[in-house]
Image (cartoon, coloured by chain):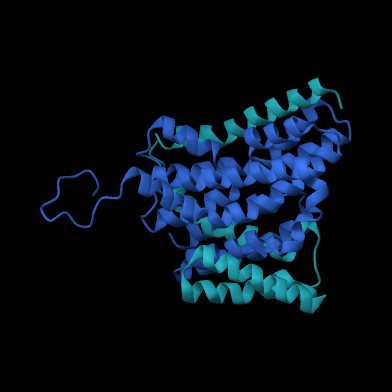
Chain colours: A cyan, B blue
Amino acid sequence: MSAGYVWVIIIGMAVSNYALRFVPIAMLSRLKLPRPIERWLSFIPVSVMAALLVGEVLRPDGRWLPLLENPYLFAAIPTAIVYHVWRNFLGTTVVGIVLFLVFRSVLG
Amino acid sequence: MCGMPTPEPQQPPCPSARDRFFRGVRLGLPVFLGYVPVGAAFGILATTQGLTALQTVVNSMTAFAGAGQFIGLSLMNAGASILTVLAATTVVNLRYVLFGATLSTHLERTPLPGQAVLGFLLTDETFAVNIDDSRRGLATGLSMAGVGVISWLGWVSGTALGATASSFIGDPYRFGVAFAMPAMFTALLVAQAENRRDVIVGIVAAVLAILFALILPGKWYVIAAAVIAAAVGAVVYE
C-alpha cells in the first residue's frame, strides 16, 4: 500500500463521512417537517436501538451464535431487568459486563 | 427556563455550561468503555495490514466511524481502487443520514457551528444516548457535545493503544468489554420503551432486523428494519 493511496482514502473517508453526518442536521433543522414525517422520525430511535441490539446480541462480530450457547443473549436479559429497576446507564453497563463474563465462562 | 429572570430565591439553579458539558461526559462513559477495545482492535488490525500508526490514528480521529473504517481497511488490503473504497464506506455510513434527520428535530435551536460539531461527533452510540436524553427533555447542545467528546476520546485512544502497543495487549476482547455496547443498547432500549406503542414498534424492528440481517450485507439491516418499523408505527398510530 503506497502512502499516497492510504492518505487519499483517509481524507476522502473523512470528507464523505462528515458530509453524511452534518448536512442532514444543518438542512432539516431549518425546515418545518410535515407531521407524518415527524411522526415517522419519532419512531426511529426505538427502532434503531432494537435493530442494533438484535445485531449485537444474536450476531456479534458478524457471526450468528446458537441461541442456547450465546452469552450475549443470556447476559442481555438480566441486564434489561437491572436497568428497568436501577435506571442507571453506566452502572447497568458495568453489571452487564460482569454478567457477560459469568455467562461466557459458564457456557464455555 | 435557563437564562430567564427568576424570582428570588433562585431555584432550581441554572446549570452552568461546564456542568451541562460534564453531565454529557458522564452519560457518555459507557460509550467510552465500549469504544476503547473496539478502537484497539482497529488499531491492531490496521497496523498489521500495513498502515502506519500515524495513518491509523488520523483515520480514527477524522472518520470516527467504526464499521466504515473496518470495511475501508479490508478493501484497502484487497487492493481496491480509491473510488471503490470510498463508495463502500459511504454506503456503510448512509445510516447517519437517518440519524441526522431524527436528531435535527431536537436541534432546531442549536446554532450552526454547534450543529457542525455535533454532526462530527454523531455515531450509532452517541445518537442513541443523546436521543434518549433529548426525549426526557434533559439534553442540551453542550451535553450532547460532552457525550460526543468522551466517545471520540475513547475511539481515538483505543486506536492509538492498539496501533502502538498491540504486542502488549493481546486480544482486547478478553476483558468482557465486548458486552459494553450490547449492555448499553439493552439499557437504552428499555429506557425508550416507555409506552405500548414504543414496545410494539421495537418488537417489529427486532423481528425485521433478524430477517434483514439474514439477507442483507453489513449494517443494512439496521436501516431497513428501522425505516420500515418506524413507518409501521407512524401509520398504525396516526
Q: Quadrant of the C terminus of chain A?
A: bottom right
- Camera sees residue B16: yes
* Furthest-right residue in this view: B78
* Furthest-front residue in this view: B168
Where does residue B124 sit, x and y in percent of width and height?
59, 49
Residue A13: image quadrant is: top right
Against A69, is B228 above or below? above
Where does residue A100 sit, x and y in percent of width and height?
69, 71
Which residue is at 12% across, 56% downward? Answer: B9
* Furthest-top residue in this view: A4
Where does residue B100 sit, x and y in percent of width and height?
52, 41
- Camera sees residue B106: no
Left or right placement of residue B68 versus residue A28 in this view: right
Left or right placement of residue B156 versus residue B14 in this view: right
Against A81, is B187 above or below? above
Against A72, is B220 above or below? above
Left or right placement of residue B212 versus residue B107 in this view: right
Q: Nearer the viewer, residue B147 or B231?
A: B147
Q: Quadrant of the N terminus of chain A?
A: top right
* Furthest-left residue in this view: B8
- What is the count of numbered marks? 0
Where does residue B226 sit, x and y in percent of width and height?
59, 54
Q: Nearer the viewer, residue A40 or B75?
A: B75
Which residue is at 56% across, 44% downward? Answer: B98
Q: Nearer the viewer, residue B176 or A30?
A: B176
Q: Nearer the viewer, residue B80 or A86?
A: A86
